Amino acid sequence: VWLQVSPFPVLCLSFPPPCKHFPASAPGCCRYGERVGVPGKTRAPSAHRAVLTLAGDPTAMTVTWTTFDLAGSIVEFGPEPGGAFTASAQGHASRFVDGGWLRRSMFIHRVTLRGLAPGQRYAYRCGSPLGWSRPYSFRALPNGTDWSPRLAVFGDMGNINPQSLPRLQHDTQQGMYDAILHVGRCHCNAMVGDAFMRKIEPVAASVPYMTCPGNHEEKYNFSNYRARFSMPGDTEGLWYSWDIGPAHIISFSTEVYFYLNYGRHLVQEQYQWLERDLQEATRPDRRRRHPWIITMGHRPMYCSNNDHDDCTEHESIVRQGLPQHLYGLEDLFYKYGVDLELWAHEHSYERLWPVYNYQVYNGSAESPYTNPRAPAHIITGSAGCKERLDPFVPKPREWSALRIEDYGYTRLQIVNRSHIRLEQVSDDQVWHGRRTDPQRPPRPARSDPYLG
Ligand SMILES: *[C@@H]1O[C@H](CO)[C@@H](O)[C@H](O)[C@H]1NC(C)=O
Ligand SMILES: *[C@@H]1O[C@H](CO)[C@@H](O)[C@H](O)[C@H]1NC(C)=O
Ligand SMILES: *[C@@H]1O[C@H](CO)[C@@H](O)[C@H](O)[C@H]1NC(C)=O
Ligand SMILES: *[C@@H]1O[C@H](CO)[C@@H](O)[C@H](O)[C@H]1NC(C)=O
């Protein structure tokens, strides 16, 4: 639902992209700048683009959405099946003015639902009596650490050419995931952001959608990113951590190293926060409950792509830090025994052997990922965006275990305290009867079924 009945006339400031192809008089469409409707019988933007995020413990979930008019911030919800919204939660709205020349203004609503029963499915809708979203549903996370979270992981999925979105939506509807990790580059800036948020809504309104900032979010000091998502903690979502089952997941910004114009202090603050978080996560009682430490950041330390990105440099900034090796992350993550590092930015899939300082630290020759002596890395940035895929250098280095130049995304299951399962899905195949990219011949299905 984009526009709904409201008591005020509304200035049309949104182009739902489908309307681009319809006359402005089509239902739900309007011409930019036009006042739509007459008092008493008008159309106002209603709640839309709900995004769910975890609020820190399994019994809480935050719903974030936008409206173009000031309206209430209410979520009505109830257990499913049941069919009735038996509870309601109130939150707050804040006005957000985009830094672009249009000075687009919108209201971002945030409501946290508390007291959810672990594992229970809920139906909900958000908005206010002026206009409600369509109904959505989600499942509250199970409690405790003795369960196997299933995650979808990808980065660089854009508004244009989001090759993996249809399958991801399908998977989500099948209830295949407990959370999504979007490893940066969310296209959540301004206009493009609106279109992108609408595309991902079927996924993001149904499972917790956890993100980290990517390079395309840097505009106006990441303000759209910070406004549109509500990540746990009080750092405005640039860095935060959370627990899911037996894992502790740390999300951080590699972008603080590249946009020093927004403040060098951010590099230091984040590094100090990371160190404190890792100290806490590696306390013996914590690590026993959450033995897996997984990081997600947008730009990788290593890659074997054929471009001039940071990860192709021997002294990559993310790995070694700012000049004079300040705040490099490789030593920090190695020191605290991070198990798995998830990255994107390169539009391809690459898995590394356990690696530290360019040396491979296989657990053993037969089982490289069993008790590895350094973190393993996965670079999964090929969910589809307008720059298409990034090619690889012909001869990979010895730390590179597998490279796939297909569109796709990663399924990550944290099976138990000792096992993680990863699977790489290829979306270069015929999907729902339609080949996703007619320029490329279909390839046989390939995946990365490594178990370690
Ligand atoms: C979740 O588990 C913890 C520890 O086992 C327990 O103290 C808490 O009451 C549980 N919460 C719910 C909502 O079941
Ligand atoms: C950008 O935002 C951060 C907070 O996320 C703030 O600490 C920093 O000073 C801001 N930088 C500029 C140049 O406004
Ligand atoms: C690591 O293990 C893999 C798989 O057994 C093997 O191909 C690779 O050569 C090993 N690397 C080193 C440096 O031992
Ligand atoms: C953990 O999962 C693996 C793979 O499914 C299984 O072989 C192993 O027995 C499990 N460990 C425990 C303690 O359940």
Image (spheres, helix red, strand yellow):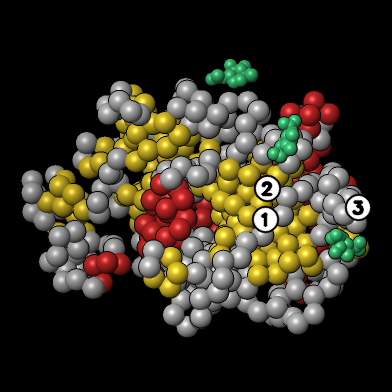
Q: What percent of the width, then of the height, locates residue 305?
A: 71, 76
Relative image position of residue 394 (x, y in whole percent): 75, 82
Q: Is residue 83 above or below residue 319?
A: above
Q: How many neighbours does mark 1 have within 10 angstroms: few (below 14), some (14-19), or many (20 or more)?
A: few
x 25%, y 41%: residue: 132
Between 411 and 100, the one nearer to me in the picture:
411
**Number of the label disc, if any, that sits on residue 421:** 2
Q: Nearer the viewer, residue 262 or 156?
A: 156
Cβ of mark 2 under 8 A from ligand 4? yes
117 to 394, vertically: above or below: above
Check disc 1 and report its element: helix, strand or loop.
loop
Q: Mark 2 or mark 3: which comes first in sequence? A: 3
The amino acid type found where label 2 is placed reads Arg
| First of labels 2, 1 by sequence position | 2
Please tell me in which quarter of the rendered image ligand 4 is found.
top right
Q: Which residue ends up furthest to the front in the rendered image?
A: 444
**Are the residues tagged 2 and 1 within 8 Å (C-beta)?**
yes
Query: What's the distance in space between the residues labelled 2 and 1, CA to CA?
Result: 8 Å
- Residue at 70 percent across and 69 percent down: it is 403
Nearer to the camera, 137 or 90: 137
The answer, for residue 211, to whether it is visible in the render is no
Check contact, mark 3 vs mark 1: CB within 8 A. Answer: no
Element on which disc 3 rests? loop
| Labels 2 and 3 touching (C-beta < 8 A) | no
Q: Residue at x 18, y 49 (%)?
A: 4
Q: Which mark is residue 449?
A: 1
Residue 312, image x and y in percent? 77, 74
Give coordinates of residue 98: x percent, y percent.
42, 60
Residue behind mark 3: 364
* Secondary element type, mark 2: strand
